[in-house]
Image (spheres, rainbow, N blue to C red):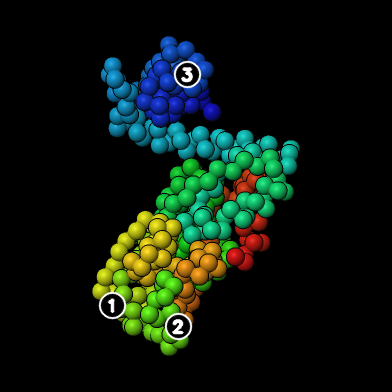
């Protein structure tokens, strides 16, 4: 990759010529020369400078965005060439939605690392919308998401079915009922995930299917805090059975037996539509598809 772009990316992210020089093991004048050369080649200034900061101007933001994509493509090219000569190894950036990332992914990683110790995974957990965007900008090699994506820029491969249930605290008045309908839970406080989450998408879809509108809704940003809140008696929720296995074993949470449940959804792998994958990516994706049961 053009070293001027590498220097520019580092200056933009560190917001400092001095820190960039330290990071790149270069002198500050050398860093400044690379930036001047890039600005001359593009015919425009890319950075706003002062004694206190270095920031991207509008032109710099455009260059930074594309430079990051170029950097990702260059790294992938190197990995692909290296893969032709060696076994699965090297960096692998994985993103996952909260439910899969927190309750399923660790088991997949444990199997992968036992068989392929030279793969070096880094993990990003976010809602499904965020993970798709990071894959699209090449900041992640592969993602695992909940819900559906229809976009020709991506390759989407379903890997597992997920069963979702209404979860209540132990001792809830409906915990032992067997003839419940969703309408019976209208007066309950429902605790749901934020917009953009695959779990929230499932909740909204279930409500729409049954034309159901709860009287009280609370929105929280993670599955873990929702579980803690349900245990504390703040409300009820629709969650993946995979997410509440420990709480069920401990007897602190119960799954309601209800008409129309469990709600079924899919976990899917999402990658760029490119047909070229590193061996590390292929190993991870194969394992994720093999370990379907959780």
27 left or right of 16?
Answer: right
Whether residue 171 is situated above or below residue 29 in the rendered picture: below
Residue at 31% from the left image edge and 22% from the top image edge: 53
Image quadrant where residue 291 sits: bottom right
Mark positioned earlier in the residue sequence (3 or 2):
3
On-image quarter of the N terminus: top right
Is there a contact, CB below 8 Å, between mark 3 and mark 1?
no
Image quadrant where residue 107 sits: bottom right
Residue at the spot of label 1:
187
Mark positioned earlier in the residue sequence (1 or 2):
2
Q: Mark on residue 176?
A: 2
- Give 203 or 131, whichever is nearer the viewer: 203
Q: Residues within 10 Å of mark 2 (few under 14, many from 20)?
A: some
Report the mark closest to the observer, 1 or 2. Answer: 2
Cα distance between the residues tagged 3 and 1: 59 Å
Residue at the spot of label 3:
22
Report the mark closest to the observer, 3 or 1. Answer: 1
- Give 77 or 201, whichever is nearer the viewer: 201
Image quadrant where residue 43 sits: top left
Whether residue 248 is situated above or below residue 194 in the rendered picture: below
């Amino acid at each position: 990759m053009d070293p001027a772009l590498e220097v520019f990316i580092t200056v933009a992210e560190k917001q400092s010529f001095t820190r960039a020089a330290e990071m790149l093991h270069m002198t500050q004048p050398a860093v400044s020369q690379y930036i001047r050369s890039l600005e001359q080649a593009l015919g425009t200034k890319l950075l706003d400078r002062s004694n206190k900061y270095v920031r991207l101007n509008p032109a710099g933001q455009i260059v930074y965005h594309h430079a990051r994509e170029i950097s990702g493509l260059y790294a992938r090219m190197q990995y692909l060439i290296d893969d032709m000569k060696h076994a699965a190894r090297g960096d692998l950036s994985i993103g996952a939605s909260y439910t899969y990332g927190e309750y399923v992914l660790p088991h997949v990683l444990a199997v992968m690392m036992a068989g392929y110790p030279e793969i070096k995974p880094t993990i990003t957990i976010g809602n499904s919308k965020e993970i798709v965007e990071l894959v699209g900008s090449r900041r992640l090699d592969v993602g695992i998401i909940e819900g559906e994506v229809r976009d020709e820029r991506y390759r989407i491969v379903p890997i597992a079915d997920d069963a979702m249930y209404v979860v209540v605290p132990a001792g809830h008045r409906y915990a032992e009922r067997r003839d419940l309908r969703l309408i019976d839970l209208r007066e309950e406080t429902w605790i749901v995930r934020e917009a953009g989450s695959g779990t929230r998408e499932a909740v909204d879809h279930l409500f729409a299917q049954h034309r159901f509108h709860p009287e009280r809704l609370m929105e929280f940003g993670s599955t873990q805090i929702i579980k803690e809140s349900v245990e504390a008696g703040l409300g009820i929720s629709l969650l993946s059975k995979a997410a509440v296995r420990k709480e069920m074993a401990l007897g602190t949470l119960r799954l309601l037996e209800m008409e129309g449940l469990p709600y079924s959804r899919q976990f899917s792998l999402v990658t760029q539509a490119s047909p070229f994958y590193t061996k590390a990516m292929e190993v991870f994706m194969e394992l994720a598809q093999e370990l379907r049961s959780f």
